[in-house]
Image: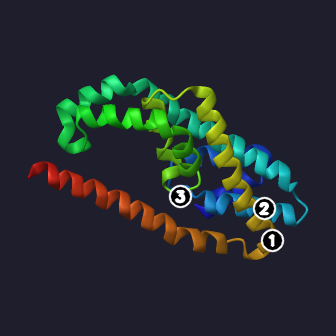
Amino acid sequence: MFDWIIRFEKMGSLGIALLMFAENVFPPIPSELIMPLAGFSAAQGQRNLVIVIVAGSIGSLLGALLWYYIGQKIGAKRLAQWATKYGRWLTLSPKEVEQACAWFDRHGGKAVFIGRLIPAVRTLISVPAGIAGMPLASFLLYSAAGTILWTALLGTAGYFLESQYEKVAHWMNPISNVVIGLIVLGYLYRVVRSFK
């Protein structure tokens, strides 16, 4: 995967944007490697750090937008129907769908902003935003704020670490694994509880 990332990164701003779009659509592709590598290229004088951050943010935001539209297409009504039919496996009841949408109406902006800064949650947060019908302008505003902060953090870390930019991924990977582990454990707990 690393060779593949390097090949795209050599395409410049377009390659960085495409990689960050792919990272949002297929979460196993790590932004923790893409942006620090792009930042390292900027430190070497091959790129401009600001353009690297802008390109990464645009690609990432387009990926988030895709998931937002998927969530919007599903919608709260359809999700509630699925919850009625497959509630055990979705670990949701129609009432919980309604409560989640009401919660998202009140706290959606903060949830999207913070979610865009958490590995593994970064992609997932766009789906409930779409399902809950969060206005597109609000979604873009909060998502862009979190996305720019995330890509700037990673790109700048790569810029200052230079040839040791891969250390960013080593620091972030354990956090990603813990978040994924907690999501999986939470899901399994809810499935087991639903069968009792």
**Mark drawn on residue 39:** 2
Q: Earlier in the sequence, mark 2 or mark 1?
A: 2
**Of residues 163 and 8, the one drawn nearer to the viewer in this rendering:** 163
Q: Which label lies toward us, 2 or 3?
A: 3
x, y percentage for residue 10? 77, 54
Q: Disc 1 marks which amino acid?
A: Phe
Q: Is residue 188 left or right of residue 56?
A: left
Q: Name the front one of labels 2 and 1.
A: 1
What kind of element bears circle 2?
Answer: helix
In the image, 125 versus 70, the foreground residue is: 125
Tell me the distance, in whole angstroms, between the alpha carbons under discs 2 and 1: 8 Å
Q: CA distance from mark 2 to mark 3?
A: 19 Å
Number of numbered discs visible in the structure rendering: 3
Q: Which residue is mark 3?
A: 119
**Residue 48: horizontal and vertical position, in percent?**
88, 54
Camera sees residue 195: yes
Q: Which mark is residue 2?
A: none
Q: Residue at x 20, y 51 (%)?
A: 191
Task: Name the N-terminal-most of marks 3 and 1.
Answer: 3
Tell me the colour scheme of the image: rainbow
Q: Amino acid at mark 2?
A: Gly
> Does residue 13 sit above or below 163 in this rendering?
above
Task: Name the residue that disc number 1 marks.
Answer: 160
Is the residue 181 above or below the residue 26 in the image? below
N-term-proximal mark, 2 vs 3: 2
Is the residue under label 1 in contact with that under label 2 (CB below 8 Å)? yes
- Left or right of residue 10: residue 91: left
Q: On the rendered image, what quadrant is the N terminus found in?
A: bottom right
Q: Are marks 2 and 3 in contact (CB under 8 Å)?
A: no
